[in-house]
Amino acid sequence: MPADYTEIPEAAFENIEQQRDASKLGMWVFLCTEVMFFGGLFLAYCEYRHLHPDSFAAASSHLSWMLGSVNTVVLLASSLTVALAVRAASLRSAGTVNLFLVATVLLGIAFLSIKGFEYYTDYREGLIPGSSFTYSSSQPGVQAREVEMFFMLYFIMTGVHAFHMIIGITAFIVLIAMSRQRALSLQTIENAGLYWHFVDVIWIFLFPLLYLVGHH
Amino acid sequence: MSHAIVSLRSYLLVFAGLLVLLGATVGASFLELGIWALPAAMAIACAKALLVAAFFMHLHQENSLVRLVACAGLFWLGIMVMLAMSDVLTRL
């Protein structure tokens, strides 16, 4: 960010405060569209879980609640580092902003690595939905097709979430580069932060719904 | 609107609160809560989301227009979920 931190508003705005408010409002409207985007997936999950509770519980028990918990801690920590980066930007401390942004990128990559390892484990266990999907269980009420539906939802929801994280990590890498050239404004980093926190909130709901349904 | 800068201690307390709630949701999943397992998990998740939205996303300092937009998103989500689930819960 600029050393003296003077920001000049665009011509459409009376002052920088008004511009910042407009920019933030726009970000929240975008996040509303994201709520509806993920909302459809959560709705599909609710319906199928309601219809096939036993199969969903059996399927969920194949996921590692421990890896899921570790990943939740990693993601919550990355939200903290983003919040601290925004705070440092408000305090006009460019060096600290960079430090926390780098920490966020590293935590994001750690999350995706653990997620990748989980996907690999799922693959080894034969839990990827598709024409070759087979599942047998002695438990009453557990059907292979319904278990497959759980994993379909699991891969789509966590996959879309991971894709959002890749976008977020890319955005923060760009922000770090901008910050190095002292071209990073407070409103840019605030909006990127809002996006990252939103992705964190999605995971807060995905974790108990996917990992903690069955007995483990 | 220019925000008062939140103290480092507050952010760390929010993070600690999030970790406690994570422990609570994992702990609750080991108890045999039956039909209350899902409401308990969702209540804890909502509490975590509220902490993130209020403090990390600064909603507690935001003007009412921004809060209204945030609530509107949840309202529309509510319409979608309620109408769809009313069908599933009563007919299937």
Image: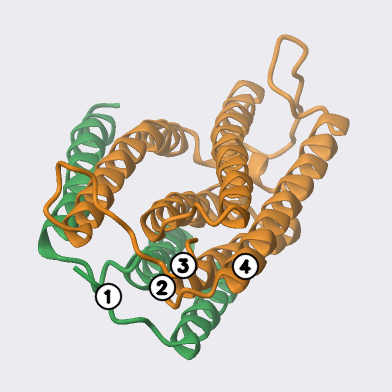
Is B84 in front, or is A120? A120
User: Separation of disc 2 and disc 4 at Cα?
Assistant: 13 Å
Front residue of this view, candidates A151 and A197:
A197
Q: Amino acid at mark 4?
A: Phe
Please tell me in which quadrant of the rendered image residue A21 appears. bottom left
What's the CA distance linking mark 2 and mark 3? 6 Å
Q: Quadrant of residue B65?
A: bottom left
In the displayed structure, does residue A100 sit left or right of residue A115? left
Per the model, the C-alpha gap separating discs 4 and 1 is 20 Å
Q: Colour of chain A?
A: orange
Q: Quadrant of residue A159?
A: top right
Residue A102 lies, with reference to residue A84, above or below; the image says above
Chain the render paints green? B
Asked if the residue under mark 3 is in contact with the one under mark 2, i.e. CB atoms within 8 Å, the reply is: yes
Name the residue that disc number 1 marks: B3
Of the two numbered discs 2 and 3 in the rendering, the one whose residue sits closer to the viewer: 2
Q: Are marks 1 and 2 in contact (CB under 8 Å)?
A: yes
Q: Amino acid at mark 3?
A: Val
